[in-house]
Image (tube, rainbow, N blue to C red):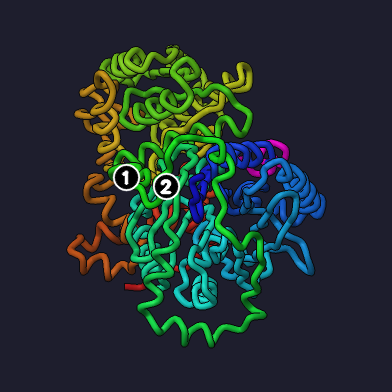
Amino acid sequence: MNIIPLRVALAQVNVTVGDLPGNQAKILQAMRDAHAAGAHIVCLPELALTGYPPEDLLLKPGFVAANLAALQDLVAASRDLPGLTSVIGFVDRVDDIYNAAAIVHEGRLIATYHKHYLPNYGVFDENRYFQAGRKAPLFLINGVHVGVNVCEDIWYPTGPIAMQAHAGAEVILNINSSPYHADKGRFREEMLATRAADNGVIMVYLNLVGGQDEIVHDGGSMVFDAQGTLIARAKQFEEDLLIVDLDTASVFRSRLHDPRRRKERLQVNPEDVPLYVISRQPAPTPAMIQSDRPIVIGAPQRIEPVMDHLEEIYAALVLGTRDYVHKTGFKRALIALSGGIDSSLVAAIAADALGPENVLGVSMPSGYSSEGSKTDAQELAENLGIQFLTIPIEEIFRTSLKTLIPAIGEGDPGLAEENLQARIRGNILMTISNKLGPIVLTTGNKSEMAVGYCTLYGDMAGGFAVIKDVFKTVVYQLCLYRNSIGPRPVIPQTVIDKPPSAELRPNQKDTDSLPPYDLLDPILRAYVEQDRSIEEIIAMGFDRATVQRVARMVDLSEYKRRQAPPGVKITPRAFGRDRRLPMTNRYREVI
């Protein structure tokens, strides 16, 4: 009989906020799959039962009670999974409500862990809802001391992980619903390696996967040995069940050579780190008892490759779009195809997310639309295999201008007339959506949203803004990336090469109204994402007048951004959940 001290399953699942029956079913299936794989422990993500983040659903007592009832059903179901301990994220209610982890074994709720550190920055509002935990329990499983904690708790070097390690934990299970932004995985990996090595523990880090409103959770669950070496990693942006055999004997051996652990243990208050005994002796893996397949302790674990910068951003946009559309009950999407770079990228993302058969592209040319834009839109649709429809708006535009003469007169056309074209297009898209049911995906990028180069109730009209957190320069990079994968390029090279234009007046170019994007985007990163002052940005080498102009456009456009649809967050500082400024605001920097 093969004996493995501890086999852990990391169940990287995609759940939906508020879908308690669906989430419960998904959790139970993961428990069963882990048991079938011979795991002693299965970890489910932070607040897996409710979905993350549940936001003001937590203010509904009925929702909290239903989540507790669903947990009891899972506890009862665990009777049929002998030898398996499950760690399940849920909302606990005692004197208050807590972001909690349930430790469940063979029909019993052994104990609960309450999250200590409640993040209240960026996309997080946990202090609004939860009480902070105080205790950091340990669990003896197969003779191995195991600590459980939740997400933010691992980021603090002197937090629960230190308490549990000092009390003798050999393994730390940290369950997460950690949101994605570009290149965050590298920082996570560095931090986790440091925590594992500093505390001399095996670090098991489980992360949620899936999109929820504007947030994307990227998965990428990881395991580090007690020296801080990565020994296993799950897939990014996909559901995954990662099975890891832990060499816990190595932790004990290393501690024999480090007398500091003995002194630190004397400082631990046993009341703060209670011990719950589940099983004292090593046990065979439950599903492997009758198996003849050899199991090698300490064998190399599965380490999935890490995506590169553009690959992970594109994957996040695809996953975020797919989950928002499907989780809100839509099946199909509708996009205005202008023949420009932004709509081309959104169409490619939508086709990859939903399947080309579920995407409709609509070209709505006016008298100002170039012939190249019309043909580029059609070629893109053919390359992607999406449905394509042309609805000219010139007659509607002229009729609208004539109708409006009593109100606006017959002067030379200006901004109002330009925006009228965008609003006609928005009206057409929303009417098709209303009649046929697809969700409208808007095509504005972060550079445009930042400076207000967009039209309320026009190109901003829709249900989901796929690239609202993607700067224009990155849009070009993502188009080149998309063309580099698959059997052939899908975005016409003419789309990539031509100067960007809204085509709302003769010979219009974006640079008529904005600095070139390769100049604009670095200023926006400094002003919007880094909160640098105007003087600081000028000191970086940018022209004073340009910086002042860009800052003013950003400040005056807050009211527009508040009315924009949600969209996928891919930067550390997205508009909406991250960057929140008052719409009525007279503060301006004095320089």
- Is residue 65 shown above or below 494? below
Task: State whether residue 131 appears in this view.
Answer: yes
Magenta stretch in the rendered image: 15-23
Mark 2 Cα within 10 Å, few/some/many (few <14, many 20+)? many
**Image quarter in which the C terminus is found:** bottom left
User: Which percent across, then down, holds residue 534?
Assistant: 31, 67
Relative depth, front residue between 312 and 22: 22
Three-letter amino acid code of the residue under disc 1? Val
Is residue 565 at least partly visible in the picture? no
Q: Tell me what residue is drawn at x 67 percent, y 43 percent.
A: 81
- Whether residue 20 is in magenta: the answer is yes
* Residue displayed at 46% across by 13% down: 391
Residue at which label 1 appears: 306
Residue 568, percent across and down?
Answer: 46, 42
Q: Which residue is mark 2?
A: 220
The question of residue 358 being in magenta is answered with no
Q: Amino acid at mark 2?
A: Gly
Q: Check whether the beta carbons of the residues at disc 2 and disc 1 lie within 8 A of each other.
A: yes
Disc 1 on helix, strand or loop? loop
Q: Position of residue 381 (x, y in %)?
A: 36, 16
**Label located before the other in sequence (2 or 1):** 2
Disc 2 on helix, strand or loop?
loop
